[in-house]
């Protein structure tokens, strides 16, 4: 089992920044690919970013490329999502998830463990 707890969400004005964190506990964190997904009201959950277990490979949705950065610290069992130049359309609940593979994926169905989510609201 892997437990995930997100933090760092909040209310920010358009153009601002937030840094999300996801702390993992349980099975060996470093063996898992980590991903961030988001879900806005009335919409399906969508992929945001993923990072390989080594941190050497990252993968981003086109909508966040160049604005968001995913990283991980295996010594702290934590994955981060630095979000810059935020837009109102980034407003959503953000979830972190794990995938027992060294290869990142944008498919939520391939992620076995999920956190409870943290709300990000971007005002215009």
Image: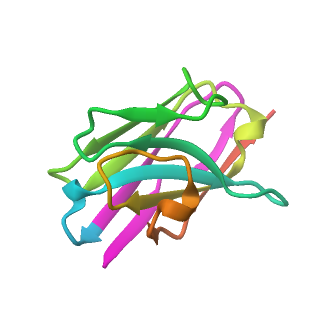
Indicate the quadrant where residue 65 lies: top right
Look at the image and name its color scheme: rainbow
Q: Which residue is more in the foreground, 121 or 71?
A: 71
For residue 16, side relative to residue 20 (left or right): right
Please report the residue visible at 68 percent of the width from the left and 57 percent of the height from the top.
45
Along the viewing direction, whichever of 64 and 100 lies nearer the viewer: 100
Which x, y percent locates residue 76? 19, 53
- Magenta residues, start to end: 1-24
The C terminus lies in quadrant: top right
- Going by the image, does 13 lie left or right of 25? right
Residue 108 sits above or below residue 54 on the image: below
Q: Say which residue appears at 48% left-offset and 68% top-offset.
A: 114
Locate residue 75 relative to residue 70 in the image: left or right.
left
Residue 69 location, x and y as percent?
A: 45, 31
Residue drawn at (39%, 56%), measured in percent from left and top? 22
Q: Quadrant of residue 98?
A: bottom left
* Residue found farthest to the left: 75
Query: Which quadrant does the N terminus fall into?
Result: bottom left
Residue 71 lies, with reference to residue 46, above or below; the image says: above
x, y percent for residue 44:
75, 58
Q: Nearer the viewer, residue 103 or 64?
A: 103
Q: Position of residue 55 (x, y in %)?
A: 27, 38
Residue drawn 70% across and 33% down? 13
Give the camera-side residue of 72 and 86: 72
17 falls in the magenta region: yes
Furthest-top residue in this view: 66
Toward which corner of the image does residue 48 lie, by quadrant? top right
Identify whether 62 is placed above or below 39: above
Q: Is residue 44 magenta?
A: no
* Position above or below: 67 against 109: above
Q: Main secondary structure of the magenta part?
A: strand
């Amino acid at each position: 089992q892997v437990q995930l707890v997100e933090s760092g969400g909040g209310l920010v004005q358009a153009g601002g920044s937030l840094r999300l964190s996801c702390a993992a506990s349980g099975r060996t964190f470093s063996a898992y690919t980590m991903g961030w997904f988001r879900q806005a009201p009335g919409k399906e959950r969508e992929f945001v970013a993923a990072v390989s277990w080594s941190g050497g490979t990252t993968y981003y949705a086109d909508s966040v490329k160049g604005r968001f950065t995913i990283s991980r610290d295996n010594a702290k069992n934590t994955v981060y999502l630095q979000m810059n130049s935020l837009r109102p359309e980034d407003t959503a609940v953000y979830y972190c998830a794990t995938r027992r593979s060294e290869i990142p994926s944008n498919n939520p169905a391939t992620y076995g463990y999920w956190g409870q989510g943290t709300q990000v609201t971007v005002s215009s």
